[in-house]
Image (tube, grey):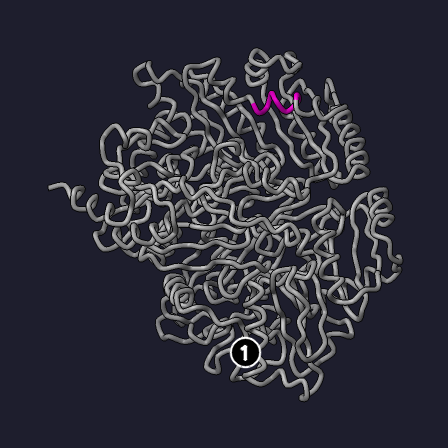
Amino acid sequence: MQAIIDQITATLRIAAERGQPLHIQGGGSKAFYGHPRAESAESLDITPYQGIVNYEPTELVITARAGTRLSEIESVLREHGQMLAFEPPHFASTATLGGCVAAGLSGPRRAAAGAVRDFVLGVRMLDGTGRDLHFGGQVMKNVAGYDVSRLMAGSMGTLGVLLEVSLKVLPLPAAEKTIGLEMNTAQAIKQMNQWAGKPLPITATCHVDGQLYIRLSGAETAIRTAQTQLGGESRSDGDTFWQSLREQTHPFFEPAASLWRLSVKSTAPEYHLPGKQLMEWNGALRWLTCQNDKDNQHSDSAAHVIREAATAAGGHATLFRGQHHTIPVFHPLTPALLSLHRRLKQQFDPAGILNPGRLYPEF
Amino acid sequence: MSPAPELINRLRAFLPPDAVLHDTEDLKPYECDGLSAYRQTPMIVVLPQTEQQIIQVLRLCHETHTPVVARGAGTGLSGGALPHDAGILMSLAKLNRILEIDPLARTARVQPGVRNLAISDAARPHGLYYAPDPSSQIACSIGGNVAENSGGVHCLKYGLTVHNILKLRVLTIEGELLEIGGEALDSAGFDLLALMTGSEGMLGIVTEITAKLIPVPEKAQLVMAAFDDIQSAGNAVANVIAAGIIPAGMELMDKITIHAVEAFLHAGYDLNAEAILLCESDGTAEEVVDEIARINTIMKSSGATGIRTSRSEAERLSFWAGRKAAFPAAGRVSPDYYCMDGTIPRKHLGQVLSGIETLSEHYGLRCMNVFHAGDGNLHPLILYDANTPGELEKTEEFGGKILEMCIQAGGTITGEHGVGMEKINQMCLQFKTDELQIFHGVKAAFDPQNLLNPGKAVPTLHRCAEFGAMHVHSGSEKFPDLPRF
């Protein structure tokens, strides 16, 4: 395995010297996400650097190489009754741990359990000059030095090449049950937030097509009591439903002209925007899709309206699928924050060779 | 000539007279934080009351190249708020307003000087609370919690500060406002919220925090188990986790601690025990009943010599009282104590504790051990007498060795107290030169002139070179028998 690291290090050093942009490549499952790779970028394949390095169920920590498939990690965890509680989307069977952390995406359990960044305990990475760096560690609490490991989550490979990641893992719930209730969007927003403020074992919520889906997790007795309190109909297709949400295979996500992800304050009122909407995370995540040109979400002015709406609700909007060259994928940063991003980038990757432009066109 | 008079005049132009302190006796209370072994009188203390005043202070510091150290409640245990002799100490204590509680969105918007517990008190009428509960929560401020990424006894289940905040208003050293994070669960760009949390006042000054609130659990219950050796207690912890239980809190005390707190409180702890494990379950009533039954079974099968389960809220609190009194009890059995804060993978607990025992004998200093067992965070309390010449130095050396053992066990030199001034040398052992350079780079990206809390948290490479030479010498000469793993 050291030979692979040596090779990646050599590639980085040469690229840094020549100013040759690199495209860090895992399983390619999230290639659609973010700005497209720079045309001049050469691929840097990380998938050979794979395998679980250390897994100790009773320490609640797994450490694996970045090229390890997420499916492999999740199946090993399942054998020991544990899980990645942030339920990362795979989007393809080739999805890797490195890509999962770099993209920083989390699934249905996020509002209850936390996001990928909340579970990152430590990383080993190479920076843009090929330096081999360790941050964080394999313990739950660690405040030595700046929290560079969490900074990697969602940085889209622009700050370093992840080699190994240590994640906190959690036990699988003893039981889970999904219930469905009929209600409109405004009612659902209110209801999800009210229930989130009560001591209820709710671990996922979704509102789509006039149905509010609630997942309850924990001891059987606790689930039964909660169901009595919440009402609604038991659903037998619960697991399939949450899986379809996590992987975006639910009919709502059928290929469309564009898919917007609005991450907003959970109590933000219902959006009256063209297209269809789906809510998750107690209302803190709103998906917006348009199936055809008449919804016109692909124009710059429509993008502006969507972003204004997200900003007004204390959040941000991402053009998740259906990229368009005049619309930035990620919510534009204020000048002060953009300049801070560039200065950080400069420290980690002075030659600007790591995934240039994937996150923001400016770096 | 001292630059102080000129600076004082300029500060008084926008701060009221009682918010600019410079007389020696007025400066005295600010010379240390919770780590009183380190003291330094600042040049000037300022007590701004508004964000606008902070902006003006920072602009002045930036213009005049004056170091500035932020201070919250001053309860920190690593010297993070130790003043700079040629700098301004900025107390944020007057920014103590809770600006908004939004019960439906479950958030609290507060100023940095608000006490940790005051947030939960304000939220409780809505059935909500702020989860991180450092033991100093009655006094410590949320701004300081952000600076140190504070935890508490419930953090295995409910997370640290970084998991429980949504948004920060941060001022740069230039006095420029940054809004980091947001009201949503994530934000665009790099995760600067994570980078700011635990940055020990080195990157910016936090002027407002939006914290998450969570529902108060319906029920909490505690199991107290006694063990006749500490390794069995450690194994019991592993067995609880292996059974798929994440307890709300899991605390371990060693024999010397049990005796110290029992003498102090008479909480009914078993004095024959080598270790006592407290294991708390919280959640819905049904969840707790289920979990407590399972925890009881596990304690039995793990060899507990005595098990008690709290039957009432009063009894639960009385079981906790001993653990919470560990520090005052240390103060009662010894003139002074020095609290360490390493984290280790729990499986190495036995080895690390026996290493501490060896060191304790070597230095002739007693050491109490309390352990956040669920998350591996160990707090050895070294008992010493500052009036005995040389004993503080011996204590510091002992403490340093404990931290080195934590690193060797695959852990860290600080789980929740921060590096500050105290553990700056051990940073040289935990991190390589390249990693320290990245830390300095991060600092430079925010504060290129190194004016915000300079000299803390991240050692200079020069300092590490000097410490390295010294360390190798003492390490090879004095401790050939220490366990290494």
In the image, is B82 to the left or to the right of B271? left
In the image, is B67 to the left or to the right of A297? left
In the image, is B462 to the left or to the right of B226? left
Figure check: A352 above or below A177: below
Q: Which residues are magenta?
A: B318-324
Query: Which x, y percent locates residue A332?
Result: 48, 72
Q: Chain of mark 1?
A: A
- Write the residue at 38% across / 45% down: B49
- Identify the image quadrant of residue A250: bottom right
Figure check: A3 above or below B395: below
Please identify the residue farthest to the bottom as the structure is shown: A293
User: Crowdedness of circle 1 by 10 Å Cα count: few (<14), some, many (20+)?
Assistant: some
Figure check: A282 above or below B348: below
Can you say which quadrant of the picture contains the N terminus of chain A? bottom right
Quick check: can you spot residue B384?
A: yes
- Identify the image quadrant of residue B8: top left
